[in-house]
Amino acid sequence: MARRHTPDQVIAKVRQGQKMLNDGHPMIEVIKELQITEATWYRWINQYGSEKNAEASKRTKELEKENARLKKLLADQMLANDILTEVAKGKFLSPEPRRRAVRMAMEKFGASERFACQVLGQNRSALRKKKSPMSFDEAQLRADLRAVASKHPAWGWRKARWHLLATERWKDTVLNSKRIRRLWREEGLVCKPKRRKKRRTGPDAGEQKRLTAEYPMHVLSFDFQSDVTSCGRHIRFFNVIDEYTRTALAIIPRRSFKAQDVVAVLEGIIAETGAQPAFVRCDNRPEFTAGALVEWCNEAGVSTAFIDPGSPWQNGFIESFNAQFRREQLSGEIMDTMVEAKYLADEWKDIYNHERPHGSLDGLTLSRFWDEWVRENQLAIA
């Protein structure tokens, strides 16, 4: 089989043959020493024999190397762009997502570990570092967080943390809020963004001080909330809360309400709590401005605090309660009958008062806050 020589080998043999000829060796010895034919020798002389041809060959070789280097740079740049477009669409804020992106780049694009780490800004030693084994306490904490999220899908990590702190297992443990938030995210649970609160006031906000509750059963707020059953018929929920403790005193579902029905619910609350409110706050619905309710307030010595028409922010406590009831219960339940609606309302009322931590009360449940207030103010009550 004919042997194929590289340009470097040809140039070296041509120089060797020319040196032998200059030393007086005959041509037959030269071609025998170089192991080529005489025709090949003359062909090599024409191509590489002169200095000019040798310089051109050297320059060609350099251009080929430069071209190969540029092709590799272009291919690497295109591969890096593909990786950044497909794998790293956003900014990585934690190590684990960056590790997953590197592994994905290696599997999907066939990139080397070094190249993928360089493109994605991942340290190779950090990539190879194995995750420390999970402790029993952390595994238990993750399981409890998943259980809370499963039972209360609308809760965020803050309420979950307060709820765990109230349980027997975690009440004596320091549950750092940043740790709970991190585990909540790692478990893929819902994380509500914290919205900036905005105070809405009427045109006379600076002229008249708004009525503020100072103790339980001082001010009651109530309002109606609408929903529908599966057959399309409307339901009206009559919601009553205590403004000081935020406790839900009544969630009554009916197809329709009259002023007498409102009075009956309020009398039932007074009989259940053993205390009479000093004020009731509501809007100007016909059921609330009817003579039956006004007459009952006058006889019971209860003052009314009607809000201005078209100003729901003046009754913010009940509006907030309605929003929570809508988000945590009504939006996730299908009601077929009024009996089912009453059961779901009572169930959520019990959870809201006894299990759900409240942010404005430092994570206490509403029933516990009311009990602590009564215990601290026993002498004043007596």
Image: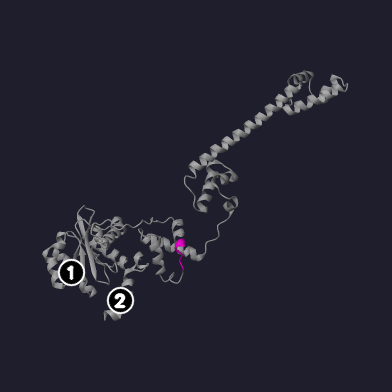
Percent coordinates x, y for residue 10 in the rendering: 75, 26
Q: CA distance from mark 2 to mark 1?
A: 24 Å
Percent coordinates x, y for residue 286 in the rendering: 14, 59
In this view, 13 is above or below 306: above
Amino acid type of the residue tagged 1 in the rendering: Ser
Q: Left of 179 or right of it: where is 305?
A: left
For image coordinates 79% across by 24% down, the residue present is 14
For image coordinates 69% across by 27% down, the residue present is 59
In this view, 31 is above or below 306: above
Give yes or no for residue 175 being in the magenta stretch: yes
Start and end of the magenta stretch? 174-179
Q: Which residue is mark 2?
A: 374
| Badge 2 or badge 1: first in the primary sequence | 1
Percent coordinates x, y for residue 227 in the rendering: 23, 56
For image coordinates 47% across by 62% down, the residue present is 179
Label disc, if present, on residue 303 of the rendered structure? 1
Give yes or no for residue 327 being in the magenta stretch: no
